[in-house]
């Protein structure tokens, strides 16, 4: 445990000096503020409190921004150590590879958690300032916050796996961007195309909801939307959100971080310094 | 005497290329052993196998009674890699605090360690601003953590100035006196400065010589070179009485086997005041090293 903590402290310090902490905090704060101010405009007719509406916008923000930040922080984690030549020495220390990985995860995840807390805190502040009923949305905001951190853990794990597989920072960076584009942007476009082509057939009614759950980013979005039914109208996947019970969309949100981290551990084990 | 490191019939092949072939040796507790060889002779590969970073193809390696790379072995072995590197964003003190914690030692010892290697003043500067010699000292400081039983040092003196090199060897003497075994590698015999108990010479992945510096000197039996300076005009005369001498102006170069050295010296002394000066040059450390490391046709 001590070895994980000391690794985390070192990694946090490095992230602080490399400005990753500042970048993550500023990005989350700015986007959350912009969304909470802009997102409040169309809320009048819906009869929902401000904070719940803001949470719907923040969900979309998290889907894009949290995986991106996670991958940017993690792609260098192993490939960078290989390139700098610091890995052989580290691996002669009495520390297990999984402990190294967990230490880095702890540091990077706490940075993401800080960024999420700051962004969501600011958004909640704006909502409370504009609407006295905003407290009704606190449960949804809390759910969004912890699931955002889990989403970050998933993509951190994926980033470490990519970093161990590529072994060079440049290659790892390319793979990380590809992964983000594929899972966050192209996957949805592909599904959309399939749904259009299928025209209400078996794929749309049976397979589509599960295709969403198979992607950590979509599972996250689905979970947050289905958990608060009032927001169904706020996003295109509202239909699918209604078709899947909350517990079913929660399972992948909880399992994906473990799966991604196991993948990273496997890939890291294969690295010979 | 207990062996800290035992290597028996170690062979390593990389994609059909033999990096190491049937290497066997032991290192006793408190012994300082130098591993010499050209670039590519297999020194670093051997060290990586001892540390468990690379698996051996054949043969047996035991480190402090455990398998190389096992948790038990890693707790007792310290390593200083060739061209040691650290994260440039951390300070020397922070880096050492981290390494101390990884070995279960108190991070408060970081400043003491830096003081031992003469880096106390730069402790709070980022490693990115350090010179190569300073990084090498940080590397040495981390190798001193927690009284290791075996220190594996890959070209530890590269980048160090002569004074620091001297300090470094006296640090090693202290560690060896406390019972730590030391295995260090180098390109050349001159660099280990005869401050080691035993020398192993690797050439083309094979162990071609092992022994103390005196042993190696005797076994190589390299000829002694004599430079004789003749007094004005006597050079041709001296050349006649010293068969095999090469005359270069007023100077004569002569080589002879170790066993004939006294005999030749006697003859030169017999020439009396025809000789202005005499210089005896024993085979240099470089000569001895080349003799062994080139034997396999390198």
Image (cartoon, rainbow, N blue to C red):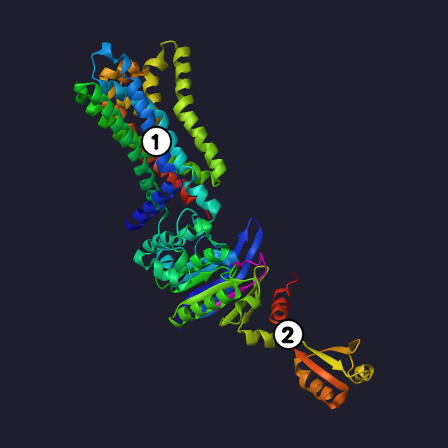
Q: Quadrant of the C terminus of chain B?
A: bottom right
Q: Position of residue A121 (x, y in %)?
A: 25, 29
Q: Secondary structure at mark 1?
A: helix
Instruction: Mark 2 vs mark 1: give the one in front.
Output: 1
One can see residue A45 in this view: yes
Q: Quadrant of the N terminus of chain B?
A: bottom left
**Dot 2 corresponds to which residue?**
B283
What residue is rendered at 41% in x and 70% in y?
B176
Quarter of the image holding residue B50?
bottom left
C-alpha distance separating marks 2 and 1: 69 Å
Q: Mark 2–mark 1 contact, CB under 8 Å?
A: no
- Same subunit, tags 2 and 1: no
One can see residue A271 in this view: no
> Is A57 rendered above or below residue B110?
above
Label 2 crowding class (10 Å Cα cut-off): few <14, some 14-19, many 20+?
some
What residue is rendered at 44% in x and 57% in y?
B139
Q: Which residues are magenta?
A: B33-43
Q: Position of residue A176 (x, y in %)?
A: 44, 32
What residue is rendered at 32% in x and 30% in y?
A151
The answer to if B42 sits in the magenta stretch is: yes
Label 1 crowding class (10 Å Cα cut-off): few <14, some 14-19, many 20+?
some
- How many dots with numbers? 2
Which mark is on residue A35? none
Q: Is residue A106 left or right of residue B38?
A: left
Callout 1: chain = A
Quarter of the image holding residue B254?
bottom right
> Is B182 rendered above or below residue A75?
below
**Dot 1 corresponds to which residue?**
A26
Q: Secondary structure at mark 2?
A: loop
Callout 2: chain = B
The answer to if A90 sits in the magenta stretch is: no
């Amino acid at each position: 445990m001590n070895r994980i903590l000391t690794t985390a402290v070192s990694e946090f310090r490095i992230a602080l000096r490399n400005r990753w902490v500042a970048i993550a905090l500023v990005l989350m704060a700015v986007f959350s503020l912009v969304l909470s101010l802009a997102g409040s405009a169309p809320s009048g007719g819906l009869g929902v409190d401000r904070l719940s509406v803001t949470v719907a916008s923040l969900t979309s923000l998290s889907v894009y921004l949290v995986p991106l930040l996670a991958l940017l922080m993690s792609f260098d984690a192993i490939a960078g150590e290989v390139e700098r030549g610091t890995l052989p020495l580290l691996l002669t220390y009495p520390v297990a590879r999984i402990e190294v990985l967990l230490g880095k995860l702890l540091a990077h995840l706490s940075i993401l958690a800080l960024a999420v807390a700051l962004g969501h805190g600011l958004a909640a502040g704006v909502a409370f300032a504009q609407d006295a009923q905003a407290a009704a949305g606190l449960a949804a905001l809390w759910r969004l916050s912890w699931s955002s951190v889990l989403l970050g853990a998933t993509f951190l794990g994926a980033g470490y796996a990519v970093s161990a597989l590529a072994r060079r920072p440049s290659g790892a960076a390319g793979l990380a961007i590809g992964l983000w584009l594929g899972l966050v942007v192209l996957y949805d476009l592909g599904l959309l195309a399939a749904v259009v082509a299928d025209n209400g057939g078996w794929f749309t009614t049976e397979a589509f909801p599960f295709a969403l759950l198979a992607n950590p980013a979509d599972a996250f979005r689905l979970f947050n939307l289905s958990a608060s039914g009032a927001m169904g109208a706020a996003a295109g996947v509202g239909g699918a959100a209604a078709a899947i019970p909350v517990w079913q969309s929660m399972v992948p949100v909880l399992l994906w971080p473990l799966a991604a981290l196991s993948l990273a551990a496997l890939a890291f084990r294969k690295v010979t310094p | 005497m207990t062996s800290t490191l035992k290597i028996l019939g170690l062979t390593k092949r990389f994609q059909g290329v033999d990096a190491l072939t049937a290497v066997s040796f032991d290192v006793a507790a408190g012994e300082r052993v130098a591993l010499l060889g050209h670039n590519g002779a297999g020194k670093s590969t051997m060290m990586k196998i001892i540390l468990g970073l690379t698996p051996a193809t054949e043969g047996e390696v035991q480190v402090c009674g455990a398998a190389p790379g096992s948790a038990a072995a890693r707790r007792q072995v310290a390593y200083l890699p060739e061209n040691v590197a650290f994260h440039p964003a951390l300070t020397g003190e922070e880096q050492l605090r981290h390494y101390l914690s990884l070995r279960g030692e108190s991070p408060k010892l970081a400043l003491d360690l830096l003081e031992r290697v003469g880096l106390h003043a730069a402790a709070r500067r980022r490693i990115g601003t350090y010179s190569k010699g300073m990084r090498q000292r940080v590397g040495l400081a981390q190798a001193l953590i927690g009284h290791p039983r075996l220190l594996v040092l890959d070209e530890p003196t590269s980048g160090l100035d002569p004074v620091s090199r001297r300090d470094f060897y006296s640090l090693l003497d202290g560690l060896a006196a406390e019972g730590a075994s030391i295995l260090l590698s180098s390109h050349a015999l001159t660099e280990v400065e005869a401050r080691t108990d035993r020398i192993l010479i690797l050439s083309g992945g094979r162990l071609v010589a092992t022994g103390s510096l005196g042993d190696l000197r005797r076994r190589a039996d390299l000829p002694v070179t004599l430079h004789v300076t003749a007094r004005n005009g006597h050079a041709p005369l001296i050349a006649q009485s010293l068969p095999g001498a090469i005359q270069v102006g007023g100077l004569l170069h002569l080589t002879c086997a170790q066993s004939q050295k006294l005999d030749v010296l006697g003859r030169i002394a017999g020439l009396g005041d025809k000789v202005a000066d005499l210089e005896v040059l024993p085979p240099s450390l470089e000569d001895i090293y080349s003799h062994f490391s080139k034997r396999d046709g390198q």
